[in-house]
Image (cartoon, grey):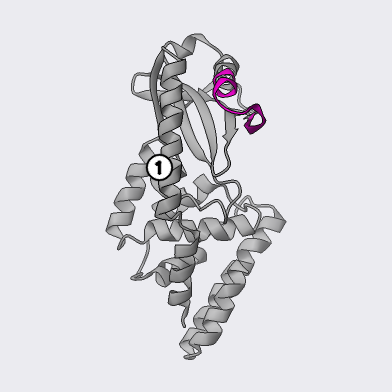
């Protein structure tokens, strides 16, 4: 075996398989239908985030994997975020078991047996969606462009041998087993914005991405996690240079062990 084979095989095991995505899509369709029946003043409702971008990890590999679902209300600007979250909570309680529902500001979480939804209240004006701002913010609402990152990711993926999504998922998996050094959004944005030099396969892209991972602003604990990953990659590179592909593979396994 080799590092490339190992990373390729690992990538398959952390990706949502077709049967699991089909099951989730059915739940999304049901949720959308129930929302449409319950509310009569919804401007739009749709999935966004990592599930929509196909960079989400399968739930068996990340227990926090969830589907972000935006519910944009007509005249939503007339209400506070908490008012709209209360409406979503009442909807969920009317349509699902109550022990599956809780608020995790700024969303309402609906946890089913096979997937977790995060319902995000919003309103839409002048080409911009507005969602509840973080608790630390001085304003109640913040602007968001839910489809912008998806377009950037699609373009980057197409221009790089369709390996960028696989790379994102590998880095996300490393991130999960290292207790979330970065946010998922930070990792995706980093991968999309990075320029890759002389990379032709998944191993090349992984090595290149790891080499450039930023540590500025991280706590010493998180910085140590990143530096360890970089040392592992450097050792694997050296083993490959010496022709010791088996040792290189064993070294890379330490990053995900």
Q: Closer to the camera, 204 or 16?
A: 16
Residue 221: image x %, image y %? 71, 57
Position of residue 158 relative to residue 125, above or below, is below
**Residue drawn at the location 38% of the way across and 58% of the way down:** 164
| For residue 48, side relative to residue 229 (left or right) | left
Residue 155: image x %, image y %? 29, 50
Badge 1 marks a residue whose secondary structure is helix
Q: Residue lying furthest right in this view?
A: 221
- Density class for disc 1 (Cα within 10 Å; few <14, some 14-19, many ≥20) is some
Residue 57: image x %, image y %? 50, 53
**Residue drawn at the location 40% of the way across and 53% of the way down:** 18
Q: Closer to the camera, 114 or 214?
A: 114
**Residue drawn at the location 58% of the way across and 18% of the way down:** 90
Query: Mark 1 highlights which residue?
Result: 52
Q: Quadrant of residue 114?
A: top right
Q: Closer to the camera, 23 or 146?
A: 23
Residue interval drawn in magenta: 90-101
| For residue 183, side relative to residue 194 (left or right) | right
For the C terminus, the quadrant is bottom right
Is residue 202 covered in magenta?
no
**Residue drawn at the location 67% of the way across and 56% of the way down:** 222
Is residue 94 covered in magenta?
yes
Residue 153: image x %, image y %? 36, 49
Position of residue 31 relative to residue 208, above or below, is above
Chief SS of the magenta region: helix
Residue 223, can we see it? yes
Residue 144, can we see it? no
Q: How many marks?
A: 1
Position of residue 244 relative to residue 134, above or below, is below
């Amino acid at each position: 075996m080799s590092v490339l084979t190992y990373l390729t095989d690992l990538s398959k095991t952390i990706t949502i398989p077709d049967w699991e995505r089909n099951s989730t899509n059915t739940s999304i369709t049901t949720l959308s239908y129930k929302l449409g029946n319950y509310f009569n003043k919804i401007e739009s409702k749709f999935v966004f985030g990592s599930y929509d971008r196909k960079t989400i990890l399968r739930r068996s590999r990340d227990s926090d994997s969830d589907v972000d679902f935006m519910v944009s209300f007509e005249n939503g600007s007339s209400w506070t975020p908490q008012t709209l979250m209360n409406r979503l909570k009442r909807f969920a309680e009317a349509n699902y078991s109550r022990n599956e529902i809780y608020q995790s500001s700024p969303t309402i979480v609906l946890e089913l047996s096979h997937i977790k939804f995060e319902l995000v209240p919003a309103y839409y004006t002048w080409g911009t969606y507005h969602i509840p701002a973080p608790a630390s913010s001085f304003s109640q609402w913040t602007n968001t462009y839910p489809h912008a990152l998806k377009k950037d990711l699609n373009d980057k993926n197409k221009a790089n041998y369709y390996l960028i999504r696989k790379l994102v998922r590998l880095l996300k998996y490393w991130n999960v087993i290292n207790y979330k050094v970065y946010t998922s959004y930070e990792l995706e944005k980093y991968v999309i914005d990075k320029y890759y030099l002389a990379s032709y396969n998944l191993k090349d892209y992984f090595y290149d991405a790891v080499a450039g991972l930023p540590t500025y602003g991280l706590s010493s604990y998180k910085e140590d996690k990143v530096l360890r990953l970089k040392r592992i990659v450097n050792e694997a590179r050296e083993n490959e240079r010496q022709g010791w592909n088996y040792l290189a593979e064993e070294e890379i396994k330490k990053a995900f062990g």
